Amino acid sequence: MTHQIVVCGAGIVGLSSALALARRGQRVALLAPRVSVPPADPNHYHARVYAISPASQRFLAELGVWDALPSARLTPVQAMEIHGDADGLVHLNAWQAALPQLAWIVESGEIERVLIQAVRMFGIPWLEDRCTGYQAGTVETESGARLQAELFVGADGAASPLRTAAGLKHEAVSYNDTGLVVNLDAERAHQGTAFQWFRDDGVLALLPLPDTADGPQVSMVWSMRDAQARELLALPAEEQAARLESMLEHAAQGRLGRLKVRSKLHGFPLTLERAQMVAPGIALAGDAAHRLHPLAGQGLNLGLGDVEALARTVAGREPYRQAGDLRVLHRYQRARAEPVLALRLATDGLHKLFGSRATPLVWLRNAGMQWVERAPLVKRRLIAGASTN
């Protein structure tokens, strides 16, 4: 079977890739097992949430899916409160950069739901199969089918079967940290503020979510040392919740009052990864191409930036070039090189800076935060930089 473009993967990056390319007039098919998202429960929120930047919000609006998200399940972030591991403290507010909000907190399941609906409404063929092999412009699937295309897009996650099958270079370095995510009831209202603590045992973030019948709610993302995380994840549910609540009482400094576990705790390994982004007839996007430390919350925004650049580049190619022409794909790679490298250096640098216990560095990083707190221009630039990813 021959196609112009086949997108491998049906996560957020895969679905948005297929939709973005199709909306720009490309003939696209989606290759992935069919995804099912259960109906939303008014008092149950997905543990995995994303901070959607203004740039990503505009892109999702261009795809026609942002307005389809239920407004009751979107939480605008008006401010950020960032704590160092001593007396460092930085407040960032949307008004400092003349923005209506810094970001939106959105559940992964809700984004997937509207993207699936849009893909169906747009009539994009969905091949319910998965990539198991690749050779000379042909993908072999689990069912034994052989698919040919001008371009295969690997938007199939960090373990990317297409990347592996095609033999594209891939480097991964473990942070020896585990990302822990869970939803929490909060005693005090978050008031649209996201909180972050850089600690000697990792980075803790509390992200605002809509209130439930039980009151205020936040999403916890804690990048914790592997040994400590394994110990916590191994505990029985009730003992685990009690231990986590006790840890949060100290770590969150009582900022939101008592925090109580309201969902299952999930953990995933944290790695710094990069891959060969293009090859003849192949382009990677999202986690298949790069993974960063989640301390800046920019992973999905970076992936959506990949999607936007890829769709624009492929659709804007010369009429005599195929979608998978390496000259075209190199333009995509160049367009993404600077933003990917900048965010990689920033997140990895921050992780290393706050991971050191050397006394001079402890003083330096907290003094730096105090300086930023007193520098409105620097704050505006920080906010502007984050909003464009």
Image (cartoon, rainbow, N blue to C red):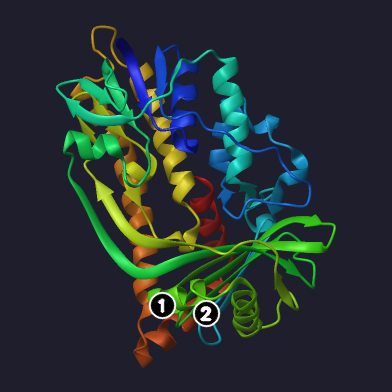
Inspect the image, locate mark 1, and give the three-letter code of the amino acid beneath it: Phe
Decide which of 68, 337 is in the foreground and name it: 68
The residue pinned by badge 1 equals 354
Give how far across and how far down residue 205 sits, in percent.
57, 67
Residue at x 35% of width, y 54% of height: 342
Contact? badges 1 and 2 (CB < 8 Å): yes
In this rendering, is residue 12 above or below 17? below
Badge 1: how crowded within 10 Å, few (<14), some, or many (20+)? many
Q: Is residue 242 above or below residue 104?
A: below
Total numbered labels: 2
Q: Is residue 325 visible?
A: yes
> What's the residue type where badge 2 is placed?
Gly
Visible in this render: residue 328?
Answer: no
Residue 90: where, in percent of width, then height?
A: 58, 73
Disc 2 target residue: 84
Image position, residue 155 (x, y; %):
37, 35
Q: Circle 1 — which element?
A: helix
